[in-house]
């Protein structure tokens, strides 16, 4: 490093000593989650080189190696018992009548005070691959958006660890595979949990948070939260309080009722969203969940779900809310209580 002139050296020391007296809160770490970083990750992760990330294909292998490399560079270790990142599995894809080899990706920050209690943050790493005519389903929103959100949340937590402010409880960042084939990677984890499900305090699942649906064309400052009060009122209350304190999104709970109708692929159907992403495998094991979601859109499960259509400032805001909620769950005195 270049030597500083004396005056600058004194100024620098002054800054360091005054910084020590400030007690940083989570806003400092939330501020490290930026639209620019999310965009940079997503242009790679939902690029053509990843070939639509179908579970059991070369595209998935590229995706899991990208995630592993990112965690290594952030300095967060793997979440498997031996410190590995990959949780390999052989899955039966009943829809395709075949077996396939796939992997979840686990990264883990051990809690500083209550390490045996675990918060799990999930997003699915896979998507639906390449069409017969060669068009690639890049899945920028589904679920590139949730994937890069977790990377940024993990980086924010790790910065806190470096400052001696790591979470009291442990946090598992888990990218699950084969969601698109029937929630298979999350089912494999909850059937074979690395950390006991009875010690798992909550699951925050992120699946599609980078877009705006038709219902919100005139107010994009929203996100759907599904399931937050079903198993734990505490979880719902913490989530709402963090939003009021830091973010001020309009939290839309209409899909807490699984019978609320949605227009999807040309027809009206009951939404059933509570059962349709990876959080459900935790919920059915009595782990409280929140499913974060922007609703479907015309590009849902189509080759047109691409990176230039993502609202990066909105993705930043939504990701920061999930970070604040995760921070509070991991650091609050009391474990979230289940409903009686
Ligand atoms: Zn999805």
Image (tube, rainbow, N blue to C red):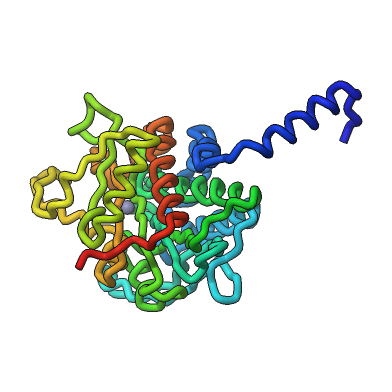
The quarter holding residue 333 reads bottom left
Tell me if residue 13 comes above or below residue 144 in the rendering.
above
Tell me if residue 14 comes above or below residue 32 in the rendering.
above
Q: Residue furthest front?
A: 21
Q: Residue furthest top?
A: 7
The quarter holding residue 190 reads bottom left
The quarter holding residue 212 reads top left
| Residue 131, percent from left and from top | 34, 51
Image point (41%, 76%), residue name: 196
Using the image as rendered, state which of residue 317 and residue 94 is in the foreground.
317
Tell me if residue 223 comes above or below residue 61 in the rendering.
above
Quadrant where the N terminus sits is top right
Image point (10%, 48%), residue name: 260
| Residue 275, percent from left and from top | 21, 61
| Residue 177, percent from left and from top | 41, 63
Tell me if residue 49 comes above or below residue 81 in the rendering.
above
Image point (52%, 67%), residue name: 115
Image point (29%, 55%), residue name: 234
Task: Specify whether 75 is left or right of 333.
Answer: right
Using the image as rendered, state which of residue 32 and residue 175 is in the foreground.
32
Residue 136 seen in this snapshot: no
Instruction: Please count the marks in the image.
Output: 0
Quadrant where the C terminus sits is bottom left
| Residue 40, percent from left and from top | 54, 38
Using the image as rendered, state which of residue 269 and residue 285 is in the foreground.
285
Residue 110 seen in this snapshot: yes
């Amino acid at each position: 490093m270049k030597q500083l002139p004396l005056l600058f050296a004194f100024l620098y020391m002054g800054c360091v000593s005054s910084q020590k007296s400030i007690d940083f809160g989570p806003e400092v770490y939330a501020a490290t989650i930026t639209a620019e970083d999310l965009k940079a990750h997503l242009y790679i992760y939902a690029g053509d080189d990843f070939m639509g990330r179908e579970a059991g294909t070369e595209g998935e292998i590229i995706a899991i190696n990208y995630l592993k490399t990112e965690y290594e560079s952030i300095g967060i270790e793997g979440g498997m018992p031996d410190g590995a990142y990959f949780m390999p599995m052989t899955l039966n894809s009943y829809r395709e009548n075949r077996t396939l080899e796939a992997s979840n990706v686990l990264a883990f920050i051990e809690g500083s005070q209550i390490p045996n209690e675990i918060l799990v943050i999930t997003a699915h790493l896979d998507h639906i691959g390449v069409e017969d005519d060669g068009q690639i389903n890049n899945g920028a929103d589904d679920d590139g958006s949730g994937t890069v959100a977790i990377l940024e949340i993990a980086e924010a937590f790790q910065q806190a660890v470096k400052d001696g402010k790591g979470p009291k409880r442990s946090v598992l960042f888990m990218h699950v595979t084969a969601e698109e084939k029937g929630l298979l990677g999350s089912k494999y984890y909850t059937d074979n949990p690395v950390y006991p499900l009875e010690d798992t305090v909550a699951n925050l699942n992120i699946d599609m948070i980078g877009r705006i649906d038709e219902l919100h064309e005139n107010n994009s400052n929203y996100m759907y939260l599904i399931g937050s009060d079903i198993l734990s009122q505490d979880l719902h209350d913490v989530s709402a309080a963090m939003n009021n304190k830091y973010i001020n999104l309009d939290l839309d709970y209409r899909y807490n009722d699984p019978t609320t109708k949605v227009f999807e692929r040309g027809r009206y159907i009951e939404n059933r969203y509570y059962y349709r992403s990876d959080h459900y495998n935790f919920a059915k094991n009595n782990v409280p969940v929140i499913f974060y979601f922007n609703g479907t859109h015309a590009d849902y499960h189509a080759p047109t779900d691409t990176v230039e259509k993502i609202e990066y400032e909105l993705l930043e805001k939504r990701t920061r809310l999930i970070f604040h909620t995760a921070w509070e769950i991991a650091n609050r005195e009391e474990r979230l209580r289940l409903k009686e």
